[in-house]
Image (cartoon, rainbow, N blue to C red):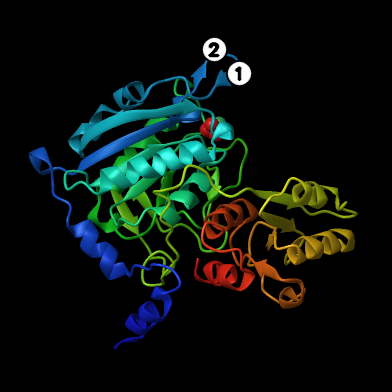
Amino acid sequence: MGYFDKLKKAMSGFFPVQTREDKDAKAAESVAGPRGLPNIHVLATGGTIAGKQASAGPHYHAGEHGIEALLGAVPTVRGLANISSEQVTNIGSQDMDEKTWLKLVHRVNELLARADVDGIIITHGTDTLEETACFLDLTVPSGKPVVLVGAMRPADAVGADGPANLFDAVVVASSPDSAARGVLVAMNGNVFEARDVTKVSTTAVQAFAAPNFGPLGQVHDGRVFYWRRSDRASARQQPEFDVSGLDKLPAVGIVYGHANAPALPVTALVEAQYRGIVSAGVGNGNLYHEVLAALADAASRGIAVVRSSRVAAGPTMRGIELDDARYGFIAAGTLNPQKARVLLQLALTRTQEPGEIQKMFDYC
Ligand code: SIN
């Protein structure tokens, strides 16, 4: 029995795992559609990519145009794939919620189970795109491509970036090379993995980066070129969560660290009976002493406490600057606070036990 088989066997009692081979096999079950082209289904959720500018002025409203209008701006995608689409919602992604996440993941899993669907694209606002990507990455078992895409300029702006990004997303979703890479994000010519991608600019077209590991690849002239494969999404086995029976997720809040930080946000979450708290700490997840005391108290009451960092890159390491074992804390590794929150919500659907949750963070 090889290393990965042994690891898979050892971990199978803990959470269901899939190897890259499992995912490749599932992805290979897909069939090409009419004209020998892949069948790509687009799920539209709104965002600036669907935004409308009221006039030549700077104001616009996200989530106004329907998906048919967005696809109409890039007619050449019909030469890459057989495209079908549906409007899941049409919102600015600041209003994304877990009800919509669950609706989305149920629909994605339903579609990907069909032999006549080869890949999924999700149009999405950029503000919380990384959180939806992370959620789907942890809840979609299929190895078929799932690609999130957005835009920084509204659909009717001069120099709108949405059409090019949508075209690239179709390129990525249509490529067999995109299979078994986890959920992907196509933005401004780059392809990112869900776990590392984050929004790094409030306004620039180059709004996304993968601060720890860099992009997986790039799209040029209608072709996707991958430079590397993420071990996390493929050979390395990350937890996957079955949310098919759920209509809500456990409540998890984030508290932001800074000099002279008060304990108040932590105590408010404890009083509101949140089941988990993520700390966006300073540096390597460090905590102002009053916040440390409040979080230690929360952990002693059985609330799951995850230490992440407000710093853009680098891991929050277990037991380096703080004795996590002593306080019953969980270290987030390279997951930023908003993604650590997503994983903690999912982890809490299985267990409240910090040691078990730490393992999920270690493998994510
Ligand atoms: C949003 O996230 O819906 C608004 C901002 C954007 O899409 O760029």
Q: Element type at marker 2? A: loop
In which quadrant will I find the N terminus? bottom left
The one nearer the camera, 129 or 215, is: 129
Tell me the amino acid under the disc marked 2: Ala
- Ligand 1 quarter of the rendering: top right
Query: Measured from the top left, where is residue 82 in percent x and y?
Result: 19, 36
Quick check: marks 1 and 2 in contact, CB under 8 Å?
yes
Numbered badge on residue 59: 1
Extreme residue in the top direction? 55
Residue at x-position 49% and y-position 52% = 134
Tell me the amino acid under the disc marked 1: His
The one nearer the camera, 289 or 57, is: 289
Q: Is residue 299 visible?
A: yes
Q: Element type at marker 1? A: loop
Mark 2 crowdedness (10 Å alpha carbons): few <14, some 14-19, many ≥20 = few
Query: Measured from the top left, where is residue 300 in percent x and y?
Result: 76, 66
Query: Measured from the top left, where is residue 140 in percent x and y?
Result: 37, 53
The one nearer the camera, 184 or 266, is: 266
Gap between marks 1 and 2, in whole Å? 7 Å
Marker count (numbered): 2
Left-right relation of 88 to 80 = right
Q: Quadrant of residue 43?
A: top left
The one nearer the camera, 167 or 293, is: 293
Extreme residue in the left direction? 35
Residue denoted by label 2: 54
Query: Measured from the top left, where is residue 179 in percent x and y?
Result: 28, 57
Residue at x-position 85% and y-position 48% = 264
Left-right relation of 38 to 336 = left
Q: Is residue 160 visible?
A: no
Tell me if residue 270 comes above or below residue 95 in the rendering.
below
| Mark found first going from the N terminus, 1 or 2 | 2
